[in-house]
Image (spheres, rainbow, N blue to C red):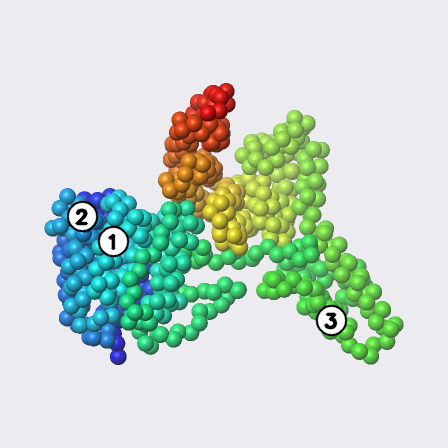
Amino acid sequence: MANYWAIEIGISQYRFLPPLHYASRDAELLHQALLKSGFAAGQCCLLADQITQTAADPGLPSKENIQAALARFQAAIQPEDLLICFFSGYGLQHQGKDYLLPIAADPQNTAETGLAMADLLKQLKATPSQNILLLLDANRAEAGQGFGAETLRLAQSLEIAVLLSCQPDQSSHEPLTLRQGIFTAALTAAWGNCMTLEQLARQLSQQLPQLSAECWRPRQDLQAVVPAQLCYQLLVPSDASQPSLPAVTDGVQADQNVQQPVQRPVQRPVQRPVTHTAGLLQPAAGLQQKLAALVAQTFPGAGSSATESSISNDLISSRSSRDAAVLTFPDGLDQAGLSDQFFWRRLLAQGGLIGGILLFGVILRNSGSLINADANSASNSAIAPQAAQSIQSAPFDTNLPVQPSDSPQPAAVNTLAPELLMQSAQTAFEAQQYEEANRQLGQIPAAQRSTAPQQLLEQVNRELLNQAKATLIRARSPMPENQVSDLADAVKVARLIQPDQPLYAEAQQQIDRWSRLILDMAQGRAERASQADAADAAKSYSKAIAAARLVPSDQAAYEQAQQAISLWSQKILDLAQSSAKANELDLAIQIGELVPSNSSDYAAAQEAIASWRNQPLP
């Protein structure tokens, strides 16, 4: 029986190179994916840098430890075994040769401190098994491009399978939106679905360009060498080679054994989604008794237990079956053999029942506005005209000064308003109108909120946060513009939670995270400008500016966003001026008009555009 071995190397904090964001995390994620797919823990060696590591730690990804791990595995591997070597870190081409850089590698002394790919491939070729797979995510822009050309050539001649994260003239990216490298995101997502090496290479070649485009990063294309004898090499142990299909829940395939990419967030949708049917809002299950009482009062004789059971079970959709959203009639209505008189009598009776229920639903849905109207009327009659005018001008301000306790009229209003607002908020909550419930409860001063309003407000705010998170995973076309728009919508919902309300700190944490994601996606758009012509580059900068403007002004990322907007505006103006120097005046005008109106370069852009329009065509 074949054994499966793996060495996962990830280095983020280099000694002599700029740090990488998620290289060590990439190795850890792949390590977990391999263990879940059936690899034995004793046959997997993880070398990833940690803050607590010292030079004597065997898990430190130093040159000596990497070579020692390879030597141990080489002595234990049998001819039919599979060895997988994964590296996430810096790769460098030096004097025409490829090198992997360990944690203490010095770019000024690459030959001595780096791992030469020629030596590494020859060492792997001497392994008793020929089933070897190299997974290299090493072409980082900070160390210079070009890594991979020699590696691909040597792997082809030695017949060793190698998958490179990108082409030698490209860079491998690790965007904040994924919190891992694009290559590792595609790799871990594909690992549970691909049984053979040929399947894995095919899926990665499709996923890498798609992920880089969705994250607004320059294109990444897989470079692969797959010898013919290894095309159908199994990537998981034989006892796990035929796993059961992933469970399908709510129409979405859920695979718990792989790290999902950005388009598959792990957060569950909101627990109680808002569902509408034929323009009517479904009543909540908690209102069944109220509906039954109303029907019994409106239609005498219909209030028996059988009728109430019929209403509860047949006419009202419960919370557990909201998605069905169908009003079902008693089974007896469709039975054959009923007389015409009995049929019409029951039809009229049940039609009246449905009409009464719909009427009550309309009243229930608009009860909040009715209560507000009554409260405003009472306030206008009890408060002086000047006070009433100030309240009407700021009806949602929870920080209005409280009237002195010796003023009897405002005291009567304050004792009544919280109860009415609580009832209205409860009704809105049961109808899943969480923003309205938050607005109603927000009018109750914090000092007057008893236990019940505070608990309800916490439930409402929890639903608002769930609603904001569900915004990020709603079904939309996978366009980057949609992703930024969804993040902005999520921030807007989370900002409804005020400082004196429950879950405010959690909401602020989410807003800060989503704001940074918006800025990261804006920077990704700007990076794509380097690979486009003048017109497309200007459009990329313009889209980056539009995204950066969505960062809220009270967030830590706002200042960085403003600096980026200023830089990108200058780049747009530079592109316009370069086009004008090339006598492409129409193009220069078109690009210059993309300079934002509120930027420091706007005046210069408008002056230049006027000058170009007055120049004669060449």
Q: Amino acid at mark 3?
A: Pro
**Helix, strand, or loop for circle 2?**
strand
Q: Nearer the viewer, residue 80 or 509?
A: 80
Of the two numbered discs 2 and 3 in the rendering, the one whose residue sits closer to the viewer: 2
**Residue 1: quadrant of the picture:** bottom left
Residue 314, percent from left and from top: 70, 68
Residue 402, percent from left and from top: 57, 33
The residue that disc 2 covers is 94
Q: Nearer the viewer, residue 367 or 377?
A: 367
Residue 328, percent from left and from top: 70, 67
Query: Of the numbered discs in the image, which one, if any, rests on residue 149?
Result: 1
Residue plotted at (49% across, 54% down): 473
Residue 241, percent from left and from top: 35, 74
**Helix, strand, or loop for circle 3?**
loop
Give whichever of discs 2 and 3 has the lower sequence position. Answer: 2
Residue 558 visible? The answer is no
Of the two numbered discs 1 and 2 in the rendering, the one whose residue sits closer to the viewer: 1
Is 161 on the left or on the right of 381, as rendered? left
Q: Amino acid at mark 1?
A: Ala
The outermost residue toward the right is 341
Q: Amino acid at mark 2?
A: His
The residue that disc 3 covers is 330
Q: Nearer the viewer, residue 450 or 358?
A: 358
